[in-house]
Image (cartoon, grey):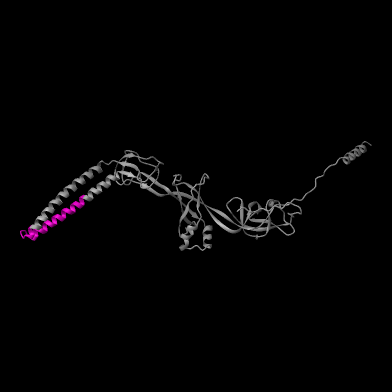
Amino acid sequence: MKNFKWTLMLSIGLASCSVDMPQQTDSSFETMTIKKSDIELPYKFSARMKGQNDVTVTPQVSGQLMKICVTEGEQVKKGQTLFIIDSRNAQLELEAAQANLQAALAQENSAKLEYESNKNLFDKKIVSSYMLNNSENSYKQAQAAVAQARAAVNRAKVNLGFCTITATVSGVIGEIPVRVGDQVSPMTQLTMLSGNTTMYAEFSVTEAVIESMVKEGVKGDDVDDYIAQLPPVTFVMKNGTEYPHKGRVISMSGVVNAETGSLTNKVSFPNPDGHLYSGIQGTIVISFAEKNVIVVPQYAVVRLQDKSQVYKVQADSTATAVEVTTADTGNGKDFIVLSGLSEGDQIVTTGANNVMEGQKVLFPGGVKKEEKSEE
């Protein structure tokens, strides 16, 4: 009797309470209709910076290093003094050469007077032709001696100038391995001067890009025109910082490296602030435009081992898996579909990983969202 009473009371309690039981509801997946569009694909290549004129600074004369006028890493201008070598010997050589020149000029003047005198006497038939010819030859020898003395003076001046070493280009001073007091010679490297008003970045183009160029029909004679039409180039440093000035591709080697299967290219970057240095490594980014292609969000593509597929919405609102081939856009958000889809097809986007073959993905009255691929 007690069990019966408790059962009766429980039944009455449940009947008197209005309890909402959960009901299964159908919801639509987000989809998009395939449309072709244009997109820019960033191609990235590892590169190393090099100065437009990287100059090895060495002395032209031997002597003791008297002064170092710059420091490592200093920005210098063309013509600025870098090093000074002991010039006393060069100065003495210049003075000796100048004295020899004066002696040669005096000798030339004497020879000239004698020649002119003999010429007048010969005209009056006082002296023989032998004496005239002899004096003329002496005069020419004196003129040659003057020319040699002048050359010696100029050479001495040049050597004296070599004692002051100046920057041949504007740029940045590299390591200075010498010290004041060292004995230097033309075999001694004083420093490396990197001319950095314009910087070059060298990089190799992969086989994929080479094949793309071949498809476009780029031939040897067309390379210059092709380079001129290439878009501006961005340089990204290793810390992720993007260099503010754009570069331009200025050369492309005409021979494919047999070992790497790549072409070597060079990009020119302006460096007005001197922020780029020789040896800096980074990434070259060139954006190529792809026109009239199918672009879908990455989350719409389901990876199954080595295959990629999307779920295509059929006329009865059910989903069918379609295998596709894709290419990465490099933006981290989208894929380019190379095959498997056509313009006008409708595919599942958000939630594609949860769709099963033959599952209904659109329902009457459900919310249907169209997603456009980002260009």
Q: Is residue 223 left or right of residue 10?
A: left
Q: Is residue 265 above or below residue 70?
A: below
Name the chief secondary structure element in magenta.
helix
Q: Who is closer to the viewer here, 358 or 120?
A: 120
Image spot of residue 172 (x, y percent): 40, 44
Q: Is residue 322 left or right of residue 78?
A: right
- What is the quadrant of the N terminus in the image? top right
**Residue at the limit of the structure toward the top, as seen here:** 2
Q: Who is closer to the viewer here, 38 or 100?
A: 38
**Residue at the limit of the structure toward the left, as seen here:** 126
Q: Who is closer to the viewer here, 323 or 248?
A: 248
- Residue 45 inside the magenta-drawn segment: no
Image spot of residue 56 (x, y percent): 37, 47
Count up the numbered dots.
0
Residue 114 appears in the rendering: yes
Image spot of residue 103 (x, y percent): 16, 48
> Residue at 14% across / 51% down in the picture?
109
> Residue at 25% across / 43% down in the picture?
90
Q: Magenta span covers which residues?
A: 121-149
> Residue at 10% across / 54% down in the picture?
114
- Residue 145 inside the magenta-drawn segment: yes
Image spot of residue 3 (x, y percent): 91, 37
Residue 261 appears in the rendering: no
Q: Is residue 335 left or right of residue 286?
A: right
